[in-house]
């Protein structure tokens, strides 16, 4: 008995007070760690969805976006999860059979129904934005353009989503929302360390948008945003009829004035490869409000290639009218443009064409040399080299590449020195560069004017801090206990 009592005195760990204290400390640690792990962590990650239809002049694409519901206003949270390319041409091509415009969207909208969880359908917004093809149709035949819009509206209303409207967006919106998209995806709004200019090339129009150093002299070319607590004063311009398909028509119309042969049935073209020979229709060139002076092309003509890059560039330059400018500087057609400033993302057809021609990197001089070589390659060799590429695209790359170099150098005034500032991009992360994401972010108010309040530390940092802090408290208790034990032993020894 005496021995037992002695052991108990020697080993204070067996004291009930100590056991209770240890249990309490352990419970406190477990509670604090559990709370800190669970705190701010969302029990179920819920996603929201949005659908945007890009009704371009050449085709329509359906984009599905997804973002975590509770992080709606955090920049960089929205990503593109699915794309569907509508079969056939753009909606403006249905001007004589408008009911078919709506029907053409069905396949992709059915796909969207499959991709988005059923429970989310009623709250998923759907927007359709039509661009330059519909702008041109409206100029030509407003009634037909209204009928096409009514047809796509009727079709989209039939789906279980929340339809928010189908409209022709302005050229300024197309430019500005493209700028928002590339900067949102590059996380430039949160970093607030400079932005990326945006260059978009379509079939019927092209846009340039950036923050200039110079004052913007024309009101039509300014657009202001306040995003995440910063003000952005943008220069933007959309050139209707300067998309690559319309410029090809313009340049063919121009050539038809002086290169038609005696029988007026052969149109020789330096922008097409030697050996290229294709029967085309007068309508293919002149059936557009972009070509104002209709000329003497016959109903059918033969388009013949000459494969001469220098001559091609000369003919393309004629499309840019530099004869008048009422501002301190202009790009072309009397449009004000300050000097290009900073880095640019060039997407859509800028990317498709430059990527095909292997011109997405290198100097402007390299690009010209490569173009010269490419354009002089005979058509039969080109067809052999690229058997899988659609003939329509393949036959036009010499023209399109030449147009892009000319537009950037002679139109927008990029030089050999700042050529490297242009990055040809298709996607940033999972999402395509283009106006659609910016359009949806704007309409859903997903980019707030002021930066949202953020917690002092990120969740991971907060958890680590709490764990370390608790361990420190525990250690202090332990040291205090050791100190207490040593002092009681010394006291016992002193008594003995
Ligand atoms: N793989 C490709 N190669 C070359 N051009 C392409 C390719 N895919 C799409 N394009 C072109 O990109 C352009 C897209 O323009 P689009 O968005 O339809 O017109 P807009 O923006 O003027 O309304 C069209 O000229 C189309 O032919
Ligand atoms: Ca487009």
Image (tube, rainbow, N blue to C red):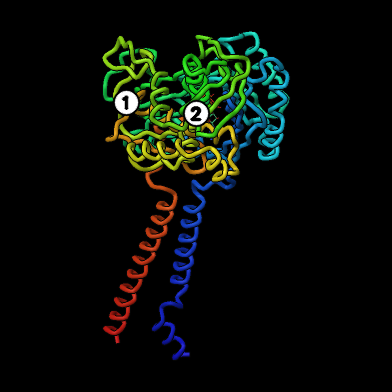
Under tag 2, what secondary structure? helix
Badge 1 local density, few (<14 within 10 Å), some, or many (20+)? some
Along the viewing direction, whichever of 236 and 332 lies nearer the viewer: 332
183 over 489 or under it: above or below = above
> With 219 as the anchor, is 303 left or right in this view?
right
Q: CA distance from mark 1 to mark 2?
A: 23 Å
Q: Is any atom of residue 226 visible in this view?
A: no
Mark found first going from the N terminus, 1 or 2 = 1
- Does any atom of ligand 2 lie closer than 8 Å to the CB of label 2? yes
Residue highlighted by disc 1? 413
Which label belongs to residue 435?
A: 2
Q: Residue at x 45, y 75 (%)?
A: 15
138 over 37 or under it: above or below = above
**Residue 216: image x %, image y %?**
31, 17
Q: Is any atom of residue 88 visible in this view?
A: yes
The C terminus sits in image quarter = bottom left
Classify the position of ligand 1 by quadrant: top left, top right, bottom left or bottom right.
top right
230 over 43 or under it: above or below = above
Verify CB contact (< 8 Å) between mark 1 and mark 2: no
Badge 2 local density, few (<14 within 10 Å), some, or many (20+)? many
> With 190 as the anchor, is 429 left or right in this view?
right
**Residue 290: image x %, image y %?**
51, 14
């Amino acid at each position: 008995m005496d021995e037992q009592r002695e052991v108990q005195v020697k080993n204070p760990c067996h004291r009930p007070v100590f056991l209770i204290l240890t249990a309490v400390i352990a419970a406190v640690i477990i509670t604090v760690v559990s709370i800190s792990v669970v705190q701010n962590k969302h029990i179920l990650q819920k996603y929201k969805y949005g659908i945007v239809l890009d009704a371009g002049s050449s085709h329509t694409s359906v984009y599905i976006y997804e973002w975590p519901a509770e992080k709606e206003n955090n920049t960089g949270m929205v990503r593109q999860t699915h794309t569907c390319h509508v079969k056939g041409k753009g909606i403006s091509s249905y001007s004589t059979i408008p009911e078919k415009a709506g029907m053409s969207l069905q396949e992709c909208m059915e796909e969207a129904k499959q991709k988005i969880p059923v429970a989310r359908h009623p709250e998923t917004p759907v927007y359709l934005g039509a661009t330059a093809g519909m702008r041109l149709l409206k100029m030509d035949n407003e009634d037909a353009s209204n009928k096409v819009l009514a047809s796509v509206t009727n079709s989209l209303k039939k789906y279980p989503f929340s339809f928010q409207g189908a409209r022709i967006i302005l050229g300024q919106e197309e430019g500005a929302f493209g700028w928002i998209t590339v900067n949102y995806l590059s996380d430039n709004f949160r970093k607030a360390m400079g932005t990326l200019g945006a260059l978009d090339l379509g079939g019927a129009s092209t846009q340039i948008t950036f923050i200039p150093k110079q004052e913007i002299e024309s009101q039509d070319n300014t657009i202001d945003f306040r995003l995440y607590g910063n003000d952005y004063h943008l220069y933007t311009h959309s050139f209707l009829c300067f998309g690559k398909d319309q410029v090809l028509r313009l340049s063919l119309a121009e050539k038809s004035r002086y290169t038609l042969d005696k029988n007026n049935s052969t149109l020789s073209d330096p922008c097409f490869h030697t050996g290229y020979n294709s029967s085309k229709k007068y309508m293919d060139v002149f059936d557009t409000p972009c070509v104002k002076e209709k000329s003497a092309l016959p109903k059918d003509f033969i388009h013949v290639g000459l494969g001469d890059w220098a001559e091609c560039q000369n003919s393309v330059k004629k499309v840019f009218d530099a004869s008048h400018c009422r501002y301190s500087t202009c790009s072309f057609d009397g449009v004000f443009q300050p000097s290009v400033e900073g880095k640019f993302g060039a997407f859509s057809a800028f990317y498709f064409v430059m990527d095909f021609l292997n011109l997405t990197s290198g100097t402007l001089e390299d690009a010209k040399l490569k173009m010269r070589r490419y354009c002089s390659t005979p058509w039969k060799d080109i067809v052999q080299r690229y058997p899988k590429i659609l003939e329509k695209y393949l036959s036009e790359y010499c023209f399109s590449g030449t147009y892009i170099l000319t537009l950037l150098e002679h139109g927008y005034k990029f030089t050999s020195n700042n050529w490297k500032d242009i990055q040809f991009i298709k996607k940033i992360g999972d999402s395509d560069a283009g106006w659609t994401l910016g359009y949806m972010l704007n309409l859903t108010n997903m980019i707030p004017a002021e930066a949202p309040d953020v917690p002092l530390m990120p969740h991971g940092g907060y958890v680590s801090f709490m764990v370390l802090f608790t361990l420190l408290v525990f250690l202090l208790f332990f040291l205090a206990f050791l100190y207490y034990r040593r002092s009681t032993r010394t006291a016992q020894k002193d008594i003995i």
